[in-house]
Image (spheres, rainbow, N blue to C red):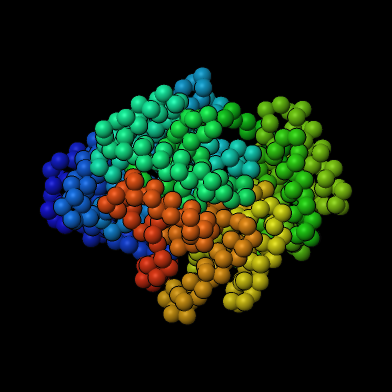
Amino acid sequence: MNKVAHYLQEHLTGEVITSADARKYFSTDGGVFTVTPSIIVYPRNENDVRKTARFSWQLAERGRVVPITARGAGTDQAGGALGAGIMVVFPAHMNRIIELDGKSGAITVEPGINYGKMQQALHTHNRFLPPFPSSIEYCTLGGAVANNASGEKTIKYGSTRDYVKALRVVLANGEIIETRRLNKRELNKKLGLATFEGEVYRSIDTLIEDNKAIISKSVIGVSKNSAGYALSEVKRKDGSFDLTPLIVGSQGTLAIVTEATVETEVYNPDTTLIAAFFDDIQVAEQVVMELRELPETPSAIEMVDENLLNFLHEHNPNQLKGIVDAPFPKLVLLVEFDNPNDRTQKRLTKKTIKILSKYQVTYQVEKTPEKKEDLWKIRHSAAALIAHTEGNLRALPIIEDGIVPVENFQKYIQNVYELFGRYHLRSALWGHAGNANLHMQPFLDLGQVGDRQKVFKLIDEYYKMVIALGGSTSGEHNDGRLRAPYLEQLYGADIYELFQKIKQVFDPYGILNPGVKINVKLDDIKPLLRQEYSMEHLYDHMPRN
C-alpha cells in the first residue's frame, strides 16, 4: 500500500497520510463497527478526488481493487463512513460556500461544509434548509446528502432528496459529471455520449424502461425512506430524467459528490409550540393522524415516552425540573407551527387545541423563545441517555431508525416495548411521531460475549418486525453496513436485483464504498463489531438527538 500512498502524495495537492493514529481515528464512525483504512486523503479540490478515483480505477483494471470511502464528520451510525482502502476526508479543505443566490435562496456548497455553519449563513438571508438532522452542529452537508438525512421538520418539508437540485460528482473512473433534471432532448444527448457518463445514462435508462412494473411497486408506504436507491424518482412520466435522486442517499456507493446545489425555504423563527401530554398511546396515534390532516401540516410533531422521562428523572433530575413533572405521562408530543402568517399560526393552533380537547389531553402553548426552548428540552433530552454510561454499558445505535405507516404507530411502540422486555433491557423511545419514525438505543456491553450475540439477535428481530408492519428499516439514517443485510427482505428479490444492477453500472469494479448498502450479509458485519463503544469523537459538540 505504500506505493499507492507515494503515488497519491506525488500527484495530489492535498495531504496523504498513513500514520497509525490517523488510521485508527478513522476506523470508527458514530456506529458500532470498526474498519481500518489504509490511506487517508484530504483533497484540496475536485481534481484531487478525480485523480484518486482515476488511479483506483486503473489499479482495478489490473486486478488490484483499492476501495474509496468518502467521509464527512464521521457521524454516521450505521457504518457507512468506514472503509478498508482510501479514506477521502472532505471537511479539512473542501468546505466552502461556492454561491448563495439571494433571490431564489439556492445555495451551492462543497461536501465538507459544516451543516450548522451553512445554516447560519442561510439565516442571515432569512432562509434555511429544513431537513437538517439532529447532528446539524457537527455533521457535514455532504454526509446529509449521502444519507438523504432528515429530522424534526421533515413532516412538513420532506427529506434532503427533495432539496438537492444539482450535483457535481466524480464517477468511479474519475470522470466528472453534473447531474440535474434533463428534458427529453437533453437526455438524448447524454445517451449519445461515447464516455462512461453516456454508458451510465444508457444503462440506467434501459433498466428503468425494462422494469417499469417492478419499479412502480418499489415505493414503500411510509412518509420518508432512506433505504435502498431511489430508482422510482429518476425518470418521470414526462420523460424527464435526473440521476440526482439516485445519488442522494447512495452513501458514496455510486459516485463521489464534490459539489451540491440545494434549494432552501423561507425561515421563520417566530413559531408556535404546543406540548401535549398523553396517558394513552392509542389516543396519541389518533391525534397524530388528525394533525397530519390539518389544512397546513405542522412543521414538527415530535415525541418522547415516559421511559425516557423516568430515565432522566433518575440520572439528571434537574434537567427537566419545572418543565415536565413526575408522575410522567405515557407520551409527550411537541407540535410546532412555523407559518409566516401569524393569523395562520393562530388558526392552526386553535384547530390543534380543539383536537386535543376532544380527547381530553392536557396541553401547553408557548410563543416566547425562552418558553419554547424549555419545551424543546423535553425532546432534545434524549442526548443525555445516549451519552450516559453505567460501567461498560453504553447506549448502542443498532435498532434506531425504523419507520412505519402512521396508522401502525401504537403497534410499533408496543412491539418495541415487548422486544426490550424479552431481552430484559430498559427501553426509552423518542423521535418523529408525525412520521412514525422512532429512535431507541439499548444499553449493552460490547466487551461481553453474551451482549455481542444479543446485538445481532436484537437487530434481526427488530428489523423483521418493522418490515412486517409495512415499514422501512431506515427513515433517515440510511443502510450503511448495519441495515444493508435487510434490504432484500424489505424490497423483495426483484427490486434488490435492480439495486445490484445499479451498483454494477456505476461501479463495475466495486471500488466505491464496498460493504455498504449492497451485497452485504449478516455474516459480513458480525466480525466488524467493536469490542467497546465510545462517543468520544462527539464530546466537543454533545449531540441533541
Q: Nearer the viewer, residue 340 or 412?
A: 412
**In this view of the protein, can residue 42 be seen by the observer?**
no
Tell me what residue is drawn at x 69 percent, y 52 percent: 406
Left or right: where 354 falls relative to 110: right
Residue 50 vertical position relative to residue 3 in the rendered view, above or below: above
Q: Give the x, y percent position of residue 267.
A: 59, 30
Residue 411 vertical position relative to residue 164 in the rendered view, above or below: below
Left or right: where 176 falls relative to 497: left
Q: Give the x, y percent position of residue 314.
A: 64, 67
Tell me what residue is drawn at x 77 percent, y 27 percent: 343
Q: Nearer the viewer, residue 216 or 83?
A: 216
Q: Give the x, y percent position of residue 174.
A: 25, 40
Q: Nearer the viewer, residue 20 or 47?
A: 47
**In this view of the protein, can residue 50 be seen by the observer?**
yes
Q: Residue furthest top?
A: 103
Left or right: where 365 falls relative to 83: right
The mark total stands at: 0
Q: Give the x, y percent position of residue 434.
A: 67, 48
Residue 62 vertical position relative to residue 126 in the rendered view, above or below: below
Identify the image quadrant of residue 417. Answer: bottom right
Left or right: where 495 falls relative to 280: left
Q: Nearer the viewer, residue 343 or 68?
A: 68
Tell me what residue is drawn at x 62 percent, y 71 percent: 419
Q: Residue furthest front?
A: 210
Residue 454 vertical position relative to residue 22 in the rendered view, above or below: below
Looking at the rendered image, the quarter that the N terminus falls into is bottom left
Identify the image quadrant of residue 94. Answer: top left
Identify the image quadrant of residue 330. Answer: bottom right
Tell me what residue is drawn at x 79 percent, y 56 percent: 283
